Image (cartoon, grey):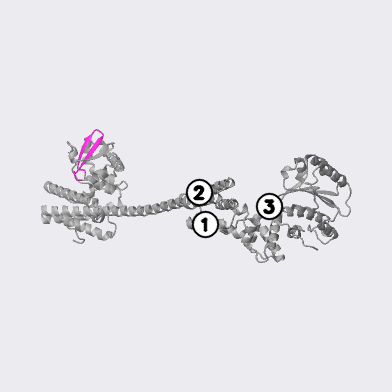
Amino acid sequence: MGYISIYRKWRPQSFSEIVGQDDIVKTLKNALKANRLSHAYMFCGPRGTGKTSTARILAKAINCKNREKDKNNPEPCNVCENCISITNGTNVDVIEIDAASHRGVEPTRELIDRVNYLPNFLKKKVYIIDEVHMLTDAAFNTLLKTLEEPPEHVIFILATTEPNKVIPTILSRCQRFNFKPITSDSITGKLKTIASAENIDINDAALSLISKYSGGSQRDANVILEKLASLDEGKIKVEDVAALLGAVDFEILFELANIIIERNISEALFFEYRLQASYQNLRVFVEEFINHLQTLFVIKNYESAYEILNINAEYKEKYSDQSKLITNDGLQFYIDLFSDLYKELKISEGSRILFKSALIKAVTHIGTKYENKEKINNAVFDEKISVFDKELKNVNFRIFEIQKNLDNISGWINKKSINAENTEIKKEQPPVAAEKPVEKKESSTVNSSQEKQKNTEGSSGKEEPEHITDKSASSSSGSPSDMIKSNWDKICNAIKSKQRGIPLCAMFVEARKIKINKNSILFYLPNNNQFHKDNLNKAENIEKIEISIKEIIGKEFKVSFFFENEGEDFISIKGVPDSIKKAGSVLPKPAEKNETKADDGKEAIKEQIMNQYSKIREKPGKDNDFNNTENSNDNKVEEYNYLEKKFGIKEKKSGN
């Protein structure tokens, strides 16, 4: 027997050999097993997908003699007389008609006349009409009645690549099967089998390129393989396939995409030179590169991308990796850029100049505008967030340390005030008379400090109601200025109870003079306390002070702070807040003269300490002892030593 073409030699002869049409094969097998065959079938699909081969296999399976013995096996045996004659095309009961050459009414009438005759050798007479869409409307109408109600011994199998040209009345009378293009993986697998059996030496990359350019047609792929086998007796390479088909290698597409992503201008220019030296058709190449970019976009934006893309398994990982290196904006621009280039190449003669210009534009300008901009913006944004987080942590830590230092200083001031008062009392009173009362009051001082720890609301040496519920001030007689002066300690305690109220109260007590105009209270600070004035006039601090005054006085006032040289006719506020005098309030009351001296001493100490503390707080950087959070324990000792040296007072040691 002479040489037979590969596509004819390797035509499927059983259902198991049909490639890429698993659903259709499964349906036909089940119909054969259950003996539920239709009188007419319509096989639709692109060329080379197995329509005619499936029709012949179905005709063999229907008339196979060995299947009559085992009806559960839908496969034809291919060894019985009926199967062999159908395979060879010599059986008169299987009639194949080319509708392209028999498209008129007369051939259709002859077919109808022969339909009524019983089959000569087979159980069923099978009519296979290929390219049925080529029949004229008159021929379709002639065939319509017979196709709707054919004799029991006849089965029609119609095949077409354009089902849209078949009239609806014919389609509605047939059981339709849509043959889909065969995937690249399936074609590559079949080509490997054929190449191995035919002793054709070809690498996998070349087979993948053949499957891509076969367009989903197994027959076209077989024809290309046969042509390559005749081209060279040695091993067939990708370059051979590209030269024969004018095709573009996958690796070249990946290479160009990487050059653009990396913005390597020198590699881009060398790539353009190599492409021109290979005499590659630029229109074909640009079209394939656009398809490559579109594939990357689908993979990047669709979870199950490989279910809708026809990509060989060996390239799936490369596509996934490359899609992660490029942004959506970049892909969209590159697709638009090369799509415009493709349109220009159709009508322009200077294709090389246009391609080089587009390539330079893609490498130099677009990568910077789309990809780098997004990466740089993200990096800068992340860096700013990181710096902000660190600064926020440092600020929170410094605030915590300042709050702790203020609490320690407040306690230290109270302790020094007690020592100062005890010193003044001892100087004014006889030693014998003062000995016992001092001991008693010292013990009561300890008790009062313990009561302070238990009662967060705070109370002075004598018992007082909580400032929030105290309404006695509002009902007491006197002018507002008298009410402010008489309830000064309670107002200070109310301010300290607010959030971050302790430092606010420390600044508030610097206001020693007031002036009341109807519903406004003007507090006057020493002229050098600019820091206190600025902070006290902040909206949030004004609100806390106004609320505290309302809680104690029972009346709303608008509060503002000024320097003493900015006002006149103001009233001095006498007395010292509880934070300074509460420990000394438990001491026995001396004579009027002694009491005045003690008050004056406390007032002087307190004013000097708070003024000095304000100056220290305003010093920036290393000179600011209270804002330096490092070595906090050493700083506290230095602060205490500094204050003792400044004011000539000594801390009372335990046990003395």
**Secondary-structure class at tag 1:** helix
Residue at point 25% right, 45% down?
A: 492
- The correct choice, above or below, for 91 with respect to 169 in the image is below
Kindly identify the amino acid type of the residue bearing the numbered disc 1.
Answer: Asn
Q: Mark 3 points at which residue?
A: 181
Q: Which of 162 and 467 is in front in this view?
A: 162
Start and end of the magenta stretch? Answer: 511-528
* Horizontal and vertical percent position of residue 22: 71, 55
Question: Horizontal and vertical percent for residue 377?
Answer: 43, 50
Q: Are marks 2 and 3 in contact (CB under 8 Å)?
A: no
Residue type at the position of mark 2: Asp
Sequence-first disc among 1 and 3: 3
Towards the viewer: 34 or 39: 39
The kind of residue on which mark 3 rests is Pro
Point out the tag, 2 or 3, that comes first from the N-terminus.
Answer: 3
Magenta stretch prevailing secondary structure: strand
Determine if residue 505 is in view. yes
The residue beneath circle 2 is 329
Q: Are marks 1 and 3 in contact (CB under 8 Å)?
A: no
Q: Which residue lies under the disc numbered 1?
A: 258
**Element type at marker 2?**
helix
Dot 1 alpha-carbon crowd within 10 angstroms: few under 14, some 14 to 19, many 20 or more:
some
Tell me which label, 2 or 1, sits earlier in the chain.
Answer: 1
Q: Quadrant of residue 484?
A: top left
> Does the segment drawn in magenta span residue 385?
no
